[in-house]
Amino acid sequence: MKPPLDSRQLRAFTVLARTGSFTQTARELHLTQSGISHSMKALEAETGCRLLDRLGKKIVLTQAGEQLLQHATRILAEMETARDALTQLGKWGRGRLRLGASTTACQHLIPQVLREFKESFPDHAITLEPGDTPELVNALLHHRVDLALTLEVEREPQLEFHPLFTDELHFLVGALHPWARAGRVERAEIPRENHILYSKRSVTFKLVEEYFRREKMTLNTVIELGSVEAIKELVKLGLGVSILAPWVARREIEEGSLVALPLGRRKLTRRWGLLHWRGKRLNLAEETFIGLCESACAPLRLPPAKPAEK
């Protein structure tokens, strides 16, 4: 493979094509006339083509020179654009932040955090990739995102988890459901209910499945959806019960259209946090985003467990 053409030679060539004079070109580039002449001979040797003709005191391009000029002009313009972009990137507050987040976090957590983030970094370019935890882990490993707000994962040694809060999953039922009226869940009735659960590919589904396996129960799952909002609507219509964290249905619980009830004596909790490459040196924007997430998630943290009574 041949080495790339020297950008300094290309720059001298484009100036010479414009001025038609070695003397004028040398003056503009603050070089000697012999230096320009030597550079053009080296460029012709490199391309294997005669690029210049002398007509009296005027330098003109050959057909090969005219073709090279088109490419050289485009190449130098791209290099200048790249330089300008890097210069802008180095200025305070400019840069990019590529985020990944679960669809639930995208709706309930990310908007507040980004609103505050843009106040400190108004010129930052932000991209947001929604997805469930396995998809976000894949996006991180393939460098499509820099930070991912998601559930804790196991066996990912390349990634580091920054915990934000722990939540607890509850049964979510419609206001007219017998469990809502009784204010409690009868264990024997759990397997007989129709359950509307979140996607089987998700970490949440696996946690729920494992929880009830340990409880020696098999849930009657009749509907599986990848949208928490759709699940809540079906539960309100009385088509079944779901298992979700109350904070994702705070509005519906406050207005009384949904009721949250504990799964049982044993709690089912999840840890939420931010994932990034292990050992990565976070920049100021990323550290700021993490700090804002910590503040936004503070109200969602479970109170510390009470010590057992003696």
Image (cartoon, rainbow, N blue to C red):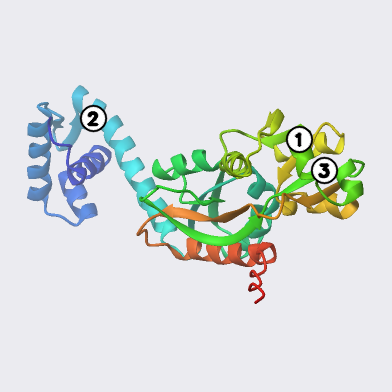
Residue at image mark 1: 230
Query: Which quadrant is the N terminus positioned in?
Result: top left
Q: Position of residue 162 (x, y in %)?
A: 49, 60
Per the rendering, the mark at residue 173 is 3
Q: Which of marks 1 and 3 is in front?
A: 3
* Image coords of residue 109 (percent x, y): 66, 55
Q: Which of marks 1 and 3 is nearer the N terminus?
A: 3
Residue 114 rendering spot, x and y as whole percentages: 63, 57
Disc 1 residue type?
Answer: Ala
Is 234 above or below relative to 293? above
Residue that extends furthest to the front in the rendered view of this protein = 310
First-in-chain label (2 vs 1) = 2
Q: What residue type is labelled 3?
A: Val
Nearest to viewer (mark 2 / mark 1): 1
Q: Name the residue under label 2.
A: 68
Amino acid carrying mark 2 in the image: Leu
Q: In which quarter of the image is residue 206?
A: top right
- Using the image as rendered, state which of residue 293 and residue 62 is in the foreground: 293
The residue under the point 74% across, 40% down is: 242
User: At which x and y percent is residue 192?
Assistant: 77, 32
Please tell me whether mark 2 sits on a helix, a strand or a loop. Answer: helix
Dot 3 lies on which element? strand
Mark 2 or 3, which is nearer the eye? 3
Task: Identify which residue is drawn at 64% across, 53% down.
Answer: 110
Q: How far apart are marks 2 and 3 (CA)?
A: 72 Å
Mark 1 crowdedness (10 Å alpha carbons): few <14, some 14-19, many ≥20: few
